[in-house]
Image (tube, rainbow, N blue to C red):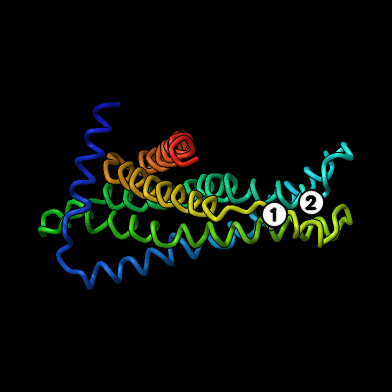
Amino acid sequence: MFFHLGRYFILMSQVFKRPDKGKILRKLIITEIDNLGLDSLGIVVIISVFMGAVVALQTAANIDSPLMPIWSVGFTARQSVILEFSPTIVSLILAGKVGSRISSEIGTMRVTEQIDALDIMGVNSANYLIMPKIIASLLINPILIIISMFLGIFGGWLACILTGLVTSHNYVYGVQIFFEPFHVFYAIIKTIVFAFLIASVSGYNGYYTSGGALEVGRSSTKAVVFSSIMIILFNLILTKLLL
């Protein structure tokens, strides 16, 4: 564990050195935003809408006490989506999709000796390959999470309207009542930390891949597993610190 932890920080010290050419870095960041963020928009939309609908329906179905107001369905859906589902669960999904892509891409370059060729040419390969992915994730992931929040709440509203369990007025009232803007800020902070963990841990696993195609697959699996573990760990830490 200490070996990998030390090697990870050594790699990050190489990643965050000043790039040789800023213009090339900007082009790489734009490319990675498209590859890592926009390509994930579809799965984020689908999962957010349906999970928001499920949370709303389960809440409405379990309100047995007449003392519990019906608008609590909207309140519960909003709190669940903003505080936990969008920043944490969607980040875990992105760890599977984006993390495996980063690790397999860099790992393939390692086993085909493309990274060695960059090093021989005097290029900081860690900076060139990993830094654009980290910056792109830090920029695009919060946008994906904000979209997920809106769609999760909308999915709950749509489910309530279509099933007739909750009226639109009561659901919207529940969404609006007792709203604290800090909760959105808290979710964005978590998302930024998770985005960094996904890109850096996946980049680390891919960068130090050795062997052939089988090892690339193993590195991709490790990237997803370790990214997910770090997300869950830091989710607990950030929740304790911020809430």
User: Where does the N terminus fall, quadrant-wise?
Assistant: top left
What residue is shown at x 44% (from left), y 59% (from top)? 36
Q: In this image, 116 relative to 162: left or right?
A: left
**Residue 238: % across, % down:** 44, 39
Total tally of numbered discs in the picture: 2
Marks 1 and 2: CB-CB under 8 Å?
yes
Q: Which residue sits at x=52%, y=60%?
A: 144
Amino acid type indicated by mark 1: Ile
Residue count near mark 1 (Cα–Cα under 10 Å), binned few <14, some 14–19, many ≥20: few
Give the quadrant of residue 147.
bottom right
* Structural distance between the alpha carbons of marks 1 and 2: 9 Å
Foreground of the two, 230 or 75: 75
Element under label 2?
loop
Expressed as whole percent of the image width and height from the top left, the position of residue 219 reads 37, 40
Kind of residue at badge 2: Trp
Which callout, 1 or 2, points to the residue nearer the camera? 1
Residue identifier under label 1: 177
Residue at 66%, 56% in the rendered image: 152
Q: Percent from the top left, x then y, of residue 104?
A: 38, 49
Residue beneath the point at 33% across and 59% down: 135
Residue assigned mark 2: 71
Q: Nearer the viewer, residue 193 or 209?
A: 193
Q: Position of residue 157 (x, y in %)?
A: 76, 59
Left or right: 239 with respect to 2? right
